[in-house]
Image (spheres, grey):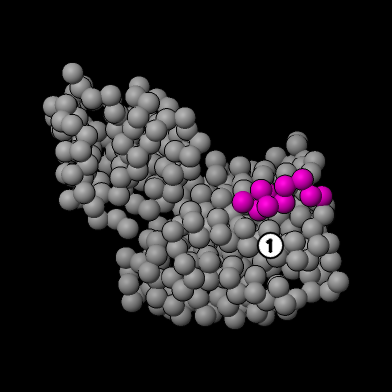
Amino acid sequence: MIITKELAQKWFTVFAEKVIQDKEQLSEYDRIIGDGDHGMNMARGAQQLLSSWQETPPVHLADVFKQAAMKWISGVGGASGPLYGTAFFEMAKAIGTKEELQHEELVNVIKAGFDGIRKRGKSEVGQKTMLDVWAPAIESLEEKQLTTEILETTLTKVTALKATKGRASFLGERSINEVDPGAASSKLFFEALLEAGDLNGD
Amino acid sequence: MVTNIGIVMVSHSKDIAKGLYDLILQVAPNVSITYVGGTVDGDIGTSFETVQQAIEENTCDQLFAFYDLGSAKMNLEMAAELSEKEIEIMDVSFIEGVYCTAALFEMNADLPAVINELEKLMIKR
């Protein structure tokens, strides 16, 4: 399938709606493992994005990602603001002036987002962070095998990890079997992508 | 004469930021120090915009920046990337790092000496 501006906007709209809907749950995960504001912060950015689209809808495909980046950087704060903001911004840069993304291009754009998170957070896969959802999701997407079941299994695996990066790393062993809030919201991001369109087809 | 490098402090808490500022003022009344603590709404956290503000409000164009926890650093990094100012983010213990820098700046110590002292206070990776 081909990603257009309309589809990308649907992707982010569904993501924003999911974040707003799950904000209590995300903050609850964060209360155990971090500072308890992940859901509220993310929902604030999500709400701002949805509202801003009422007034200034995106013109080009990259605008969808650029506008989301701005809302996350300026409106969300904490760690998730810079992390998601950087991811969306790097995705916008990777899209450039393209108005359509073929499957392979979409994968590369998401990889650019992944690299942005990695650099901003100075983290690697295996440290119980967002990256531990993004990496397997990208891999499955590349093989046109991404499903909500895979995302579910992925989050379960991340939950079993010990955090060695971010606030949760202060908990050491106690972080094992607790859900990482950034991983949980990342799962919503990929679920939203699945709901926006049939990615595994042509 | 006091150095032309300013200090920016970013904390998750307005009370920590204000408290540290009050402490530093005792040893470095002539150093340009700006700070931000908490979010725009006064809650615990950090936000990009308030960090940006603290950077721009500082009268110096070269800044040493200090932070308490990781997410403060990320917002600092983003603001630093977008600022025209030359900003060095210090991965040192927050209170000791700021205090030591401010005291040395106040007595116009040379830069290598300040860096040397800060290296001993490196705790964040």
Horizontal and vertical percent position of residue B119: 21, 49
Residue A169 in which image quadrant: bottom left
**Which of the two residues, A42 or B121, is positioned nearer the viewer here?**
B121
Name the residue tied to disc 1.
A108
Q: Quadrant of the C terminus of chain B?
A: bottom left
In the rendered image, residue A112 lying in the magenta stretch gets the answer: no
Amino acid under label 1?
Answer: Asn
Q: Height in image: A81 above or below A131? A: above
Q: Quadrant of the N terminus of chain B?
A: top left
Could one spot residue A29 in this view of the protein?
no
Horizontal and vertical percent position of residue A153: 59, 81
Could one spot residue A102 in this view of the protein?
yes
Give the residue drawn at x 13%, y 27%. B107
Q: How many marks?
A: 1
Please, what secondary structure does the residue beneath circle 1 have? Answer: helix
Left or right, residue A197 beside residue B71? right
Left or right, residue B14 beside residue A103? left
Q: Residue furthest top?
A: B1
Q: Height in image: A72 above or below B102? A: below
Horizontal and vertical percent position of residue A83: 52, 54
In the rendered image, residue A92 lying in the magenta stretch gets the answer: yes
Magenta segment = A90-99
Give the residue drawn at x 29%, y 32%. B7
Q: Height in image: A193 above or below B112? A: below
Left or right, residue B124 beside residue A121? left
Q: Residue furthest right?
A: A202
Horizontal and vertical percent position of residue A142: 71, 73
Give the residue drawn at x 77%, y 45%. A97
Magenta: main secondary structure equals helix
